[in-house]
Image (cartoon, rainbow, N blue to C red):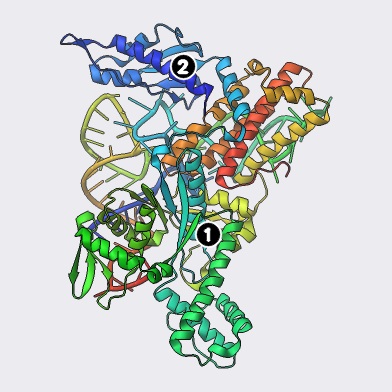
Amino acid sequence: MNYAYDRALGEIARELSQRVARLAPALDGAAQAAPAINLNPTRDASHGDFATPVALAAAKMWKGDPYEIAQGVAAQGSDGMPAVAHVDAVRPGYVNLTMGVPFWAEVVRDVLRMGPDYGRSTELQDAGPLVIEFVSANPTGPLVVVQGRSSALGATLSEMMRFAGCAVTAETYVNDAGAQLEALAGSVYARYATLLGRETALPDNGYPGSYIVDIARKLIERDGPRWLDAPFEERHSAIGRFARDLIVDEQREDLDRFRVHFDRWTSEAALHDSGAIALAMDELRASGHTFERDGALWLRATDFGDDKDRVLLRSDGRPTYLAADAAYHADKLRRGHRYLLNILGPDHHGYILRLKALVAAMGHPGSLEVLLAQHVTFKRAGETVSMSKRAGDLVTLREVMDQVGVDAARYFFIDRAPESHLVFDMELAIEQSAKNPVYYVQYGHARIASILRRAEGDGKSPLLERGRAGADLDRLEHKAEIALIRRIADFRRTVAAAARARAPHRLAEYAHAVATDFHGFYTDCLVLSDNDALTSARLSLCLAAKTVLASALRLIGVSAPEKM
RNA sequence: GCGCCUAUAGCUCAACUGGAUAGAGUGUCGGGCUUCGAACCCGAAGGUUGGGGGUUCGAGUCCCUCUAGGCGCGCCA
């Protein structure tokens, strides 16, 4: 990856750095240390294109006047920085840089040259190899809406981190062992027996959903009545497996449709069967971070910041959920991953400290990070519906996809910071109108596509070709053109910073901003005009904007339509 | 009782991790199509960033405290 943008900014940073160093007052005969140059794109165009607070930092170190230092830095103008048009010192002590037109032309050229790879970087190379684990559902029913949110978050974050140069493995864990699966098997059996004429009540902790009846029907289809009087153990495990497989298949179908794809699925039951848990327990014992009490094996979690010690093996010898997690996380680490990132639902935050303690006890302190996907509440007909675990109120991911479509669902789920409680407005998501931010962004993309089609149709294909080659880019100097290019130039930084901050919503915000800047450009600047050079340059800009919009949408998991 | 998350415009949310005049969308009011898609654009109004204190050149952001809401605190998963 080779960005003209980087070369120019690097040159500027070096020049400014030298200027600051020259201004450093001597102390005891030696020049004092100077602060590093931090070049930030400005939020407000009236502050130029890039700004650095270096004079503020220097003033702090040297106990000087920041404005005076800023003036000193700005004094030699753009000498040694050909990309810069002018330099201003501004109170309280900023140095603002305004870039020249050729600098922006180079940005467009970068995009045209790199296409879908524009924006890739190596900024998060050090954040990997990393496993992102998310969704990790009980296979006891359809995926619900919170899992929709965490799957959208996980998938987007994975893509963003890869784009920023991090090696990512996306994984999910199937909780197909323990009490919940017992309850599932019991529930299916009850429906199965009832369907076959032997009225049977659901177990106490059973699942009332109608999908259980569907599973029971399929069981009859496959096996007939053979389980009706089979020995409990045998029928229980057979029915449990049957139901789990069906449900996991359905979950996988839903996720597929939701454009969420895992590199790896791990079965908790398989960890029990393979002896992986027993092995993990041996290793933990050997680490010295466990102890025995009341016949149970405990993890000394309080040594690692948890508020209680935690049971790994119950007094009857059965492993807890935490023990299975020990085996799973040991496996992730053994496969060569340096960092682990788990996305958990809001009801699991009590689990965070003990998971971290567990990983630390296994010899990898600090390598596990937990991201909490907060609650989703629904707003329908102006009324908010809280998602309780009560069977009746549960909204499934599938329902959401059916009602609002995959694009809107993906967008809405990541449009808010993960830790903020999300209010999902069904009507707004369904609405195909200006109010809906998804369509606003997609419309931008479709509008560009339409212009490009029009260019072909109008016999301007040669100009389009010149545009692809980036022939007349120095013609781009209109305010709206520069604003759009500035935004495009910010793509790589936005992806990397958002990935680092685990903040996919910033990418949605960014895509929206690109669309806004494009619409502004479209309103102010006629693309297909009589001026051939200008037409070709503006077609270049359209191509670049389209490329970046499509990339941002791709990372979010939203389609970029040519027409709508 | 202890712990985590949250509190910013009427509503839903941002604010690049301590930087400049706190920004978007939506809602309200006003304006813009005989040129490439009006699913668009421009303008106006709207704020004591829950309250109080502190740290410093500078705080929505950091520390303390109070208030309100959500969630969690099992040899459940």
At label 2, which amino acid type do we have?
Leu
Residue A493 in view (yes/no): yes
Q: For mark 1, name the chain.
A: A
**Which chain hosts label 2?**
A
Q: Is residue A97 left or right of residue A70?
A: right
Q: How many marks?
A: 2
Of A12 and A420, the residue lying toward us = A12
Relative side of A201 to A216, left or right: left
Q: Is residue A294 above or below residue B57?
A: below
**The C terminus of chain A lies in quadrant:** top right
Image quarter for residue A247?
bottom right
Say which element carries label 2.
strand
Q: Label 2: which residue?
A: A97
Task: Give the quadrant of residue A520.
Answer: top right
Residue at 62%, 50% (x, y): give it. Answer: A407
* Of pointers 1 and 2, the one earlier in the residue sequence: 2
> For mark 1, what is the residue?
A378
Q: Amino acid at mark 1?
A: Phe
The local crowd at label 2, few if under 14, some if 14 to 19, many if 20 or more residues have their Cα within 10 Å, is: many
